[in-house]
Image: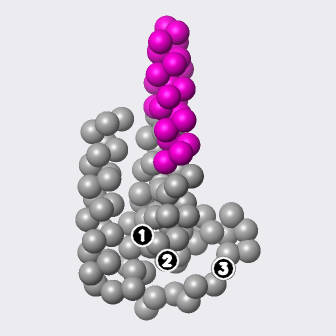
């Protein structure tokens, strides 16, 4: 059963619903994904700057935070992929998420 699009009252409620798999896939993929990717990009650039300045441990810590942030988002998206409108988008979403997890694992 696809949940009704009830707007969340807060960001915390949206995250809670996404983690439980109760949000719509498009909401988790786009509304949460754009800020997550922006933050991951910033973390990656900052990690490289730290490594350039010989602070390798700091770069490794930021890479770990970046990896965990992306993994958290992709797991939430996977849990919400069952809430896609039809079977085509459910399968397409899960394929995109699986490829993204593979990409995240290989690049971080």
Left or right: where 54 falls relative to 107: right
Q: Residues within 10 Å of mark 1 (few under 14, many from 20)?
A: some
Does 51 lie within the magenta span? yes
Residue 52 appears in the picture as rendered: yes
Q: What residue does disc 3 label?
A: 7
Whole-percent x, y for residue 91 in the image? 26, 75
Q: Identify residue for label 1.
A: 79
Choose the circle earlier in sequence order: 1 or 3. 3
Q: Residue at x 54, y 60 (%)?
A: 32
- Is residue 42 placed above or below 13 in the rendered structure? above
In the rendered image of this protein, does residue 64 appear above or below residue 104?
above
Task: Name the front one of labels 2 and 1.
Answer: 2
Which segment did they paint magenta?
37-63
Q: Position of residue 13 (x, y in %)?
A: 67, 69
The answer to whether residue 21 of the structure is visible from this angle is no
**Label 2 belongs to which residue?**
24
Disc 1 and disc 3: Cα gap in Å? 18 Å
| 25 displayed left or right of 16 | left
Query: Looking at the image, which is closer to me, 85 or 17?
Result: 85
Which sits earlier in the primary sequence, circle 2 or circle 1?
Answer: 2
- Residue at position x 46%, y 64% from top? 29
In this picture the colour scheme is one colour
Q: Secondary structure at mark 2?
A: loop
**Does the magenta run of residues contain 58?**
yes
Q: Secondary structure at mark 3?
A: loop
Sequence-first tag of 2 and 3: 3
SS for dot 1: helix
Q: Nearer the viewer, mark 1 or mark 3?
A: 3
Q: Is residue 85 above or below residue 62?
A: below
Q: Quadrant of the N terminus?
A: bottom left
């Amino acid at each position: 059963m696809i949940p009704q699009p009830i707007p969340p009252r807060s960001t915390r409620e949206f995250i809670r619903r996404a983690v439980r798999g109760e949000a719509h896939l498009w909401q988790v993929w786009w509304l949460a994904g754009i800020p997550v990717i922006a933050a991951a990009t910033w973390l990656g650039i900052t990690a490289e700057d730290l490594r350039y300045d010989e602070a390798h441990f700091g770069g490794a810590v930021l890479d770990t935070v970046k990896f965990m942030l992306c993994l958290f988002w992709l797991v939430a998206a996977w849990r919400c992929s069952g809430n896609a409108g039809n079977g085509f988008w459910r399968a397409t979403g899960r394929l995109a998420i699986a490829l993204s997890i593979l990409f995240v694992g290989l690049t971080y």
